[in-house]
Amino acid sequence: MKTKDRKSQIIFIGFVITIFLFICVLVNQWIEIREVGKVDKQVQTSFVSTENVNTSGEIQEKNTPLDTSSNQTEESILTTYKGYPVIAKLEIPKIDLETYVISEYSNQALGVSVTKFYGGNPNEVGNFCIAGHNYVTKNMFHDLKKLSIGDTFTLIDTDNHEGIYQIYLVETVEPNETQCLSQKTDGRIEVTLITCTTDSSKRIIVKAVKI
């Protein structure tokens, strides 16, 4: 009888532990969904409200080209760009793009250059998400749609660490589809580039992994 009682206790304890672990998993998923949901609201309120399209369907130019007259040297990148702190420099040879990534996202910063939108730090484990307008300027994401799977680009952080990334996904999604922002990379170092389609109705997503 005592043996049966002990087995029942063990089964009960195992059941309780299983339920507890299941609840922990659900809570973690809820927290992530909540955080991504907050970012989703930013996505929908920022890009759509600030893109300017002229009558011919082309994006109107909003900025001057990238300023290369600063004290930038071959050994390091700028720490600020037009008064905004810089977290990295992005170079995409295929579309002749060199642009500074502003470290803090805001509608004002988006009007100046591309910005960090979500995630950790550049060239570190995780998904470093960069957002930029579809403006026809040398430092914006107008030509992002020309990239293809297999293309490569470079991300240089403020510690002068250079990461080379290869594109593995290019897609167009609805504004409320925020799976691209997930930080679950299985230990990989990834970058996600985000911009709008010309009519601002959808998002162009480019995902790449460090090679």
Image (cartoon, rainbow, N blue to C red):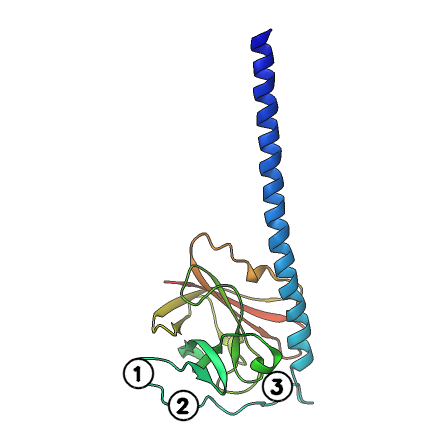
Graded by Cα atoms within 10 Å as few (under 14), some (14 to 19) or many (20 or more), the crowding at tag 1 reads: few
Instruction: State the residue lying farthest toward the top.
Output: 1
Name the residue type under label 1: Glu
Graded by Cα atoms within 10 Å as few (under 14), some (14 to 19) or many (20 or more), the crowding at tag 3 reads: many
Residue 186: image location, x then y, percent: 45, 52
Residue 109: image location, x then y, percent: 56, 81
Choose between 168 and 67: the one closer to the eye.
67
How much space separates mark 3 and mark 1, taking CA atoms? 33 Å
Graded by Cα atoms within 10 Å as few (under 14), some (14 to 19) or many (20 or more), the crowding at tag 2 reads: few
Choose between 191 and 1: the one closer to the eye.
1
Q: Which residue is the site of mark 1?
A: 74
Q: Residue at x 63, y 40 (%)?
A: 23
Residue 46: image location, x then y, percent: 65, 75
Choose between 33 and 57: the one closer to the eye.
33
Which quarter of the image is occupied by the N terminus? Answer: top right
Whichever of labels 3 and 1 marks the residue nearer the N terminus, that label is: 3
Whichever of labels 2 and 1 marks the residue nearer the N terminus, that label is: 2
Q: Which residue is the site of mark 2?
A: 68
Q: Secondary structure at mark 2?
A: loop
Q: Secondary structure at mark 3?
A: loop
Q: Which residue is the site of mark 3?
A: 59
45 to 23, vertically: above or below? below
Q: Secondary structure at mark 1?
A: loop
How much space separates mark 2 and mark 3, taking CA atoms? 24 Å
Choose between 18 and 127: the one closer to the eye.
18
Q: Nearer the viewer, mark 2 or mark 3?
A: 2
Name the residue type under label 2: Thr
On screen, residue 7 versus residue 90, left or right, reads: right
143 to 27, vertically: above or below? below
How much space separates mark 2 and mark 1, taking CA atoms? 12 Å
